[in-house]
Image (cartoon, rainbow, N blue to C red):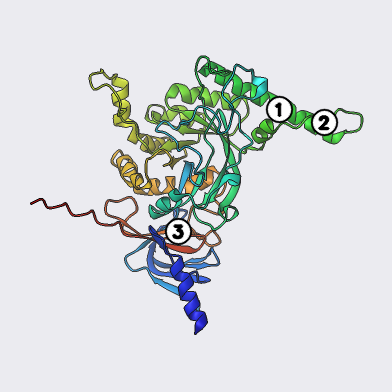
Amino acid sequence: MKYRVLALACSALLLSAGETVAEVPSVIAIRGARIVTVSGPVIARGAVILRDGLIEAVGDAQPPPGAWIIDGEGLTVYPGLLDALSTLGLPDTPSLNGTGRPNATRPQGAPPAVPRGPEDRPLNTSYLRAADELSPTDRRLEAARNAGFTGAVTFPTQGVFAGLGAVIDLAGKRPGQMVVQSPAGLYLTTHSGGFGSGYPSSLMGVIAYIRQIYLDAGQYKTAKAIYAAHPKGLKRPGYDKWLEGVLEAPRVLLPARDPKEMERMLRLGEELNLKVLLYGLAEGFRAPEILKNRNAQVLVNLRWPEKPRAADPEAEETLRDLETRDLAPSTPAALVKAGVKFAFYAGALEKPSDVAPAIRRAMNAGLSHDNAVRALTLNVAELYGVSDRLGSVEKGKIANLVVTRGDLFRDKTEVKYVFVDGIKYEPAAEAPAPAPEVTR
C-alpha cells in the first residue's frame, strides 16, 4: 500500500502550471481514432500502439494485455509537428526575427568588433553546437508542445557562421535525452555590422568572406588527409576549430528573401559544392520556376511579411512591398505546384499559437490541408535526413504524436494530447479572462 501512495505522490509532482505529464506506462494504445500517417493513406478508424517510446503498431492492431488504453473516439492522431528552424531549447540565444536573420550583431561572448581580416575568422562560431547548449528548462518548450510541436531543428543564430544545429525532441530530463540528430546543419547569415564595425562590413564582403572560409576549409581538409596518410617527415597541420565546424556540417542554411537572393545563394552553393537549404522565402511566390530549375530545397518562414510597427504612417509604400505582404502566403501553394520540396518554420513567430492562423492564411491562398501537415512533419524530417525516425505515424519510429479533436490547423481545433518519446502531455486549458471590474 505504501508503494502505491508513493507512486501517486510522485505523479502529483509531475504537474506543472501549463500542462500535465501523465504517468509513464510501458505500453499505450490509442484505440478507435482517425490516423493521419502522412507517409501513407489516412486510416479512418484504427489503433496506434506505443511501447517504450517507439511506435509498435499502426492500424488494425489489438492492444496487448496490460496496455494503457486511450479512447480515440472522435480524435485524430498526427505525427508530432516539427519546427524546421528555431532556437528552441537554447534560452540564451535570441529568437529569429521576421526575416529569418539574427537579432544580434556579433557572436555571444565575443569581444567588440575591431578592424580585422578573414584570417582572424570574425563572426565565425561554427564550432558552437546546439546539442551542447540545450536547456530542458527553456519555458518555450512547453508552449510549443501545447501547440502540437514535439520536435524542432534548433540552431545558434548569431554571426555569419552561427553554429551547428541539432534535431531535438521538445522534452527530456537531461539535454542528452532531447537530441535526435547532431549536427543537423550549419546556419549562415549575411549579417554585417556595417561601416566601421570591422571585416566584413558589407554584403559583398560577407559573400567574399563565406567563399574564403570554404576555400580555407578545403585546404585544411586536404592538409589533414595528407598528414594522416604520411605523418612521418611532414609538419603537422594546426587545429582550426572554426574550420572543423564548417567541415562537419552535412548541409548549410542560407538566407533568401527575394528572387535575386535566391539566385545568388544557389549559385554560391553550387560554386562551393554545398548541400543548401534556403530559408526565408518571403517572395518565393515570385520565383517557383527558378527554385524548381535549380532543384532547390527551401524552408518557408511562417511569419508572413507585415508593415513594420514603427513605420511612418505618412510614408508612401512601394507597390512591391504591398504585393509581397498580400501574396507571401501564396508561396507554399506555388512551391507545391512547381514540385519544390519545402518545410515550414515557426521560429520567427512571437508565440506557437500563431502557427495555426499563419497556416490558415496559406491554405486560404491555395495550400491543401494535407500539404500543410506534411510541411510541418515528414518534409522537415526528409530535408534533415531523419525521416527514418520522425515525421510520420509508422511502425518503428519515435513515438512523437499529436492527438487533436478536429482537423489540425482548423479554427477551434483542440490539442488533446501530445506524446514525446512515448510520454503523454496534456495541454492545460487556457484560464478564462478575468471579469471586468464593476465600478459603482
Task: State the residue in front, 122 or 5.
Answer: 5
Q: Which mark is residue 406?
A: none
Calculate the distance from the C-alpha at mark 2 to the C-alpha at mark 1.
Answer: 12 Å
- Residue 59 visible in this rendered orientation of the protein: no
Task: Give the residue furthest to the left.
Answer: 440
Residue at label 2? 226
In this view, the residue farthest toward the right is 233
Q: Earlier in the sequence, mark 1 or mark 3?
A: 1
Is 46 above or below relative to 255?
below
Identity, as a three-letter code, of the amino acid under mark 1: Gly
Q: Do tag 2 and tag 3 residues touch (Cβ < 8 Å)? A: no
Residue at which label 1 appears = 218
Crowd rating for badge 1 (residues with CA inside 10 Å; few <14, some 14–19, many 20+): some
Q: At 56% across and 49% down in the image, what residue appears? A: 386
**Which element carries disc 2, helix, strand or loop?**
helix
Q: Which residue is mark 3?
A: 401
Q: Residues within 10 Å of mark 2 (few under 14, many from 20)?
A: few
Query: Residue 259: horizontal and vertical position, in percent?
Result: 43, 24
Are the residues flagged by discs 1 and 3 in contact, CB closer than 8 Å? no
Disc 2 + disc 1, Cβ < 8 Å:
no
The amino acid sitting under disc 3 is Leu
Q: Earlier in the sequence, mark 2 or mark 1?
A: 1
**What is the x, y in percent for residue 168?**
54, 50
